[in-house]
Amino acid sequence: MEDYLSLFETYDVLAAFWINIQLSFWAALWALAIGTVLALFRISPIPSLQWFGAAYVNIFRNTPLTIILAFGFLGLFSVLQVSLASDLNDSLFRIAVVGLAVYHAAFVCEAIRSGVNTVPLGQAEAARAIGLSFLPAARLIILPQAFRGAIAPLGNVLIALIKNSTVAAAGSVAAEASGLMKTMIEFRSDLVIPIFFTFALGFVVLVIPIGLLTTWASKKLAVAR
Amino acid sequence: MTREQEPTTPASSGTPLVSLKNVNKHFGDLHVLRDINLQVGRGEVVVVIGPSGSGKSTLCRAINRLETIDDGEIAIDGKVLPAEGKALAKLRADVGMVFQSFNLFAHKSILQNVTLGPIKVRGMKGAEAKELAMSLLTRVGVDNQAQKLPAQLSGGQQQRVAIARALAMQPKVMLFDEPTSALDPEMINEVLDAMVSLAKEGMTMIVVTHEMGFARRAADRVIFMADGQIMEEATPEEFFTNPRSDRAKEFLGKILSH
């Protein structure tokens, strides 16, 4: 037990999780923004936008996240010298955020689209009938109801995103949780099992409230029809 | 029985408010609108009746382009319906629509349902829109429900709010697509009463309905449709007492026999 507790003196586990929380927070914001625009494209009356939305979703949803992040770090950062900040660590962090965001945006788009399907067609017809064109109708009538119908699937995307933030270790955001776990296992092979459980528990604790919150919110905010 | 008040402008003078010329539409193999020609004058109340599947709802929805047409021409106040886009939205703002299933915005209060169009489409100020909305809600008798959500109202109340919402745009013409078909019997009259008073005030109306009483009471003209065609056009008395086509006789025989 003392051995186990000494781990926390040597390694800053909480700081590592804090990196994952930050990665997840920024990636979730961007994924929500990009995913909403993609969903708008997919439900828009303009065929070229519909096509773009569908192409994006199919490409990013079907590409492994590891490949997207590895491309970000090795392709964009190392080879093409795309730098998103002057500081090396900041730049790597931001590339990880971009990679996580573009990947999860595809899932956000589909979650919102499933929310759009909960909105009866008559709502759009009524919006058009009072003279709203596509964008105002989407913004004022369709999306507010779609989001409220999409809280549970969006929560699932967020949960997946938080856990997937560990993949950023593949791109040398080494300070995050799974990166630290790898280091700890390397140096403390006597405590492999407890180390695994520590990190597993950390993510469970992080994620469970989100599941509870989205279940509560999706009931609370459901649109009465 | 005829309307107590003549339309402010006789239907024959000037350009018709709504005009359909040789309108055709198919749903796959089904020819739902066959060469429809129809002119509706300012202040005129036209009731469209016919068996289900006759194309009357499609006709009504085509007038503000919720259904596209395959060929022919539909014009509102002399302007041909544009394709999708801002011009169409602008034209739709002048055409009020009341749906069978009410379609009130489910996430907005009754008051917001009525003020949304004036504020967002007409650019009206909030206070002014609220005043207009409250006066319309009072007119249809649901002003005391203004802060509730649509789901908290009865069907009849919801449909009256839908009428107020359409009127808030100060439309040139009102379309009613079977406005009482989804209502419980005891709520039909409250909606029909609101429509009759609207007709008396001189609103141009195109009403698709199964309510023959309304047609007798409020219509200037009855259009009978079957199989996507206009089979007969007549005043209500003429149509109900002396239908000319066999389809109309058969239809009236079926619905008036009980």
Image (cartoon, rainbow, N blue to C red):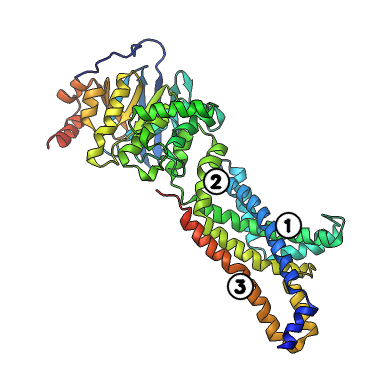
Q: Secondary structure at mark 1?
A: helix
- A81 vs A194, left or right, is right
- B90 vs B104, left or right, is right
Q: Chain of mark 2?
A: A
Q: For mark 2, what is the residue?
A: A43
Q: Chain of mark 1?
A: A
Q: Is residue B63 visible?
A: no
Q: For mark 3, what is the residue?
A: A204
Amino acid, disc 1? Val
- The local crowd at label 1, few if under 14, some if 14 to 19, many if 20 or more residues have their Cα within 10 Å, is many
The answer to which of marks 3 and 1 sits earlier in the sequence is 1
Would you place residue B69 above or below residue B21 in this image?
Answer: below
Would you place residue B82 above or below residue A186 in this image?
Answer: above
Amino acid, disc 3? Val
Q: Secondary structure at mark 3?
A: helix
Q: Secondary structure at mark 2?
A: helix
In-front residue for pair A77/A49: A77
